[in-house]
Image (tube, grey):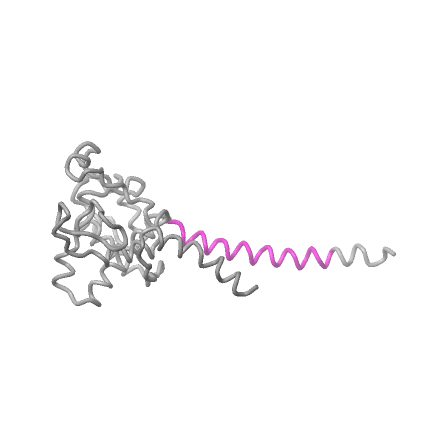
Amino acid sequence: MRTLLAALLAAPALALAAAGGHPLDRAPIDPRDLASQQSGARTFVNYCLGCHGLQYMRYNRLTDLGLTEAQIRDNLMFSADKVGETMKIAMTVKDGKDWFGVPPPDLSVIARSRGADWLYTYLRTFYRDPNAAHGWNNKAFPSAAMPHVLWKVQEQSSAMQYDITVRDLVNFLVYVGEPSGQSRKAIGIVVLFVLGVLFIFAYAMKKAFWKDVR
């Protein structure tokens, strides 16, 4: 029974890995690590935002990560004028299709749809492929239309440093997929505690009400 339960719990992850034909590595992310998310935001803006937007994320929401609006304006806003704007891109769907074959997807909910482990593995498994139009291929997503945009970062870093860069980027995208995730979990814990206390009182009232009933 225990073995069957473990297999059922592992099935979604195994299915996801099998879909790309490559086993997934565990993404060592921590949604509470604001420094990691800030680093990921910087990487995203510098290397990803040219093609991939975050249409459901506003720049000023990045204050959740411990940044001030002044820091956001000075360091992260290259394609917008107001801090209240969403993180969109100028590239049109037609341009994306003409340049890459398929329009680059918006990444607002990519971490929720693909999973952090898939993203972490994908960004760490690019390899040179002379047969590919842009010279790169990917083990987790064969024949991906996206080139290896972080190749210079990887080339100039040690393997450990590059893994940290990818971890931070994935950590940021997980936050973007559900900005209220941490507060929602905290509220959920409080709600469960309150319900537990109410259950104790309700049980005590039930015993007192029914004690003389035969």
176 or 67: nearer the viewer: 176
| Residue for point 87% across, 56% down | 214
Q: What x and y, as percent, mark residue 18? A: 36, 54
Q: In which quarter of the image is the N terminus?
A: bottom right
30 or 85: nearer the viewer: 30
- Relative to 159, residue 213 above or below: above
- Relative to 127, residue 94 above or below: above
Q: Is residue 96 left or right of residue 192?
A: left
Start and end of the magenta stretch? 179-205
Q: Is residue 22 left or right of residue 4?
A: left
Q: In this view, does 209 lie to the left or right of 47?
A: right
Residue lying at the far right of the rendered structure: 214
Q: Does the magenta stretch include residue 174?
A: no
Q: What x and y, as percent, mark residue 78? A: 16, 44
192 or 137: nearer the viewer: 137
Q: What x and y, as percent, mark residue 68? A: 25, 52
Q: What x and y, as percent, mark residue 49? A: 20, 45
| Residue for point 66% across, 59% down | 200
The quarter of the displayed image where residue 140 is located: bottom left
Q: Give the overall secondary structure of the magenta segment.
A: helix
Q: Does the magenta stretch include residue 181?
A: yes
132 or 212: nearer the viewer: 132
- Relative to 82, residue 26 above or below: below
| Residue for point 13% across, 45% down | 133
